[in-house]
């Protein structure tokens, strides 16, 4: 971000994030339970507050109702995923008028939207891993009986989560979404040489 700010030759930059979860401080403001996942996102928000206080950050997530809140200088927006999300995105982009849009995660819904949805605004897509590269290793080369014997059966029945099912969802849905995203966008952020 710092290089981008310097490249533009300005002290002020407006960034619009699209994230796949509602971040903890926004969840608390909405009276919702806090998800125990995506911990790097609130850490990144705090780092941006500290190192780049001149940035204006707007964070959009999907939910069951449209709402917003400004918390410690960051504007959070929840878009109603039951309504026309693309039209809500266009309205949000018109309102925010961002210098750059940053989509966090290639496996989620935001990354599968056509480029035109973002109305010509520069978009960068963060890779949080490359699902099509690692879903074959999701079960750690354990057999189905090994994964089942290591699982907590009551928890599996209550949550309907088991490793074989999750691996299938990653292969048939998330990896497919990711391939669409890779075709949609030109600018990517990764963390490793393997990502590159």
Image (spheres, grey):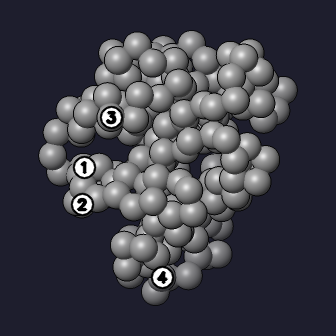
Between circles 2 and 3, the one closer to the viewer is 3
The residue that disc 1 covers is 81
Mark 3 crowdedness (10 Å alpha carbons): few <14, some 14-19, many ≥20: few
Q: Which mark is drawn over residue 64?
A: 2
**Which badge, 4 or 3, comes first in the chain's sequence?**
3
174 on left or right of 129: left
Q: How many marks?
A: 4
Between circles 2 and 4, the one closer to the viewer is 2
The residue that disc 3 covers is 95
Identity of the residue drawn at 78% across and 35% down:
191
Between circles 4 and 1, the one closer to the viewer is 1
Q: Are marks 1 and 3 in contact (CB under 8 Å)?
A: no
Whole-percent x and y of residue 51? 79, 47
The residue that disc 4 covers is 155
**Which badge, 2 or 3, comes first in the chain's sequence?**
2
Q: CA distance from mark 4 to mark 3?
A: 44 Å
Whole-percent x and y of residue 88? 24, 38
Q: Which mark is drawn over residue 42?
A: none
Q: Are marks 4 and 1 in contact (CB under 8 Å)?
A: no
Image quadrant in which you'd find residue 139: bottom right
Mark 2 crowdedness (10 Å alpha carbons): few <14, some 14-19, many ≥20: few
Q: What is the secondary structure assignment of the residue under circle 3?
A: helix
Q: Residue furthest left?
A: 83
**Which badge, 4 or 1, comes first in the chain's sequence?**
1
Q: Considering depth in this image, is 124 or 35 the residue closer to the camera?
A: 124
Look at the image and tell me in which quarter the C terminus lies.
top right
Q: Considering depth in this image, is 92 or 10 the residue closer to the camera?
A: 10
**Which badge, 1 or 3, comes first in the chain's sequence?**
1
Asked if residue 194 is positioned above or below residue 162 in the image, the reply reads above
Whole-percent x and y of residue 75? 46, 53
Look at the image and tell me in which quarter the N terminus lies.
top right
Q: CA distance from mark 2 to mark 1?
A: 6 Å
């Amino acid at each position: 971000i710092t290089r981008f700010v310097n490249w533009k030759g300005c002290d002020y930059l407006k960034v619009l994030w699209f994230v796949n979860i509602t971040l903890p401080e926004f969840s608390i403001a909405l009276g919702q339970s806090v998800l125990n996942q995506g911990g790097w996102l609130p850490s990144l928000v705090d780092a941006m507050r500290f190192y780049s206080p001149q940035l204006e950050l707007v964070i959009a997530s999907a939910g069951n109702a449209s709402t917003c809140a400004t918390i410690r200088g960051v504007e959070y927006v929840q878009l109603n995923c039951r309504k026309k999300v693309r039209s809500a995105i266009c309205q949000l982009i018109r309102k925010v008028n961002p210098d750059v849009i940053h989509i966090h995660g290639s496996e989620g819904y935001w990354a599968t939207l056509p480029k035109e949805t973002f109305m010509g605004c520069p978009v960068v897509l963060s890779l949080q891993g490359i699902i099509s590269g690692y879903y074959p290793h999701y079960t750690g080369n354990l057999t189905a009986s090994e994964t089942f014997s290591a699982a907590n059966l009551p928890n599996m029945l209550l949550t309907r989560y088991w490793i074989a099912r999750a691996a299938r969802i990653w292969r048939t849905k998330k990896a497919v979404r990711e391939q669409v995203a890779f075709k949609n966008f030109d600018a990517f952020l990764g963390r490793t040489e393997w990502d590159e």
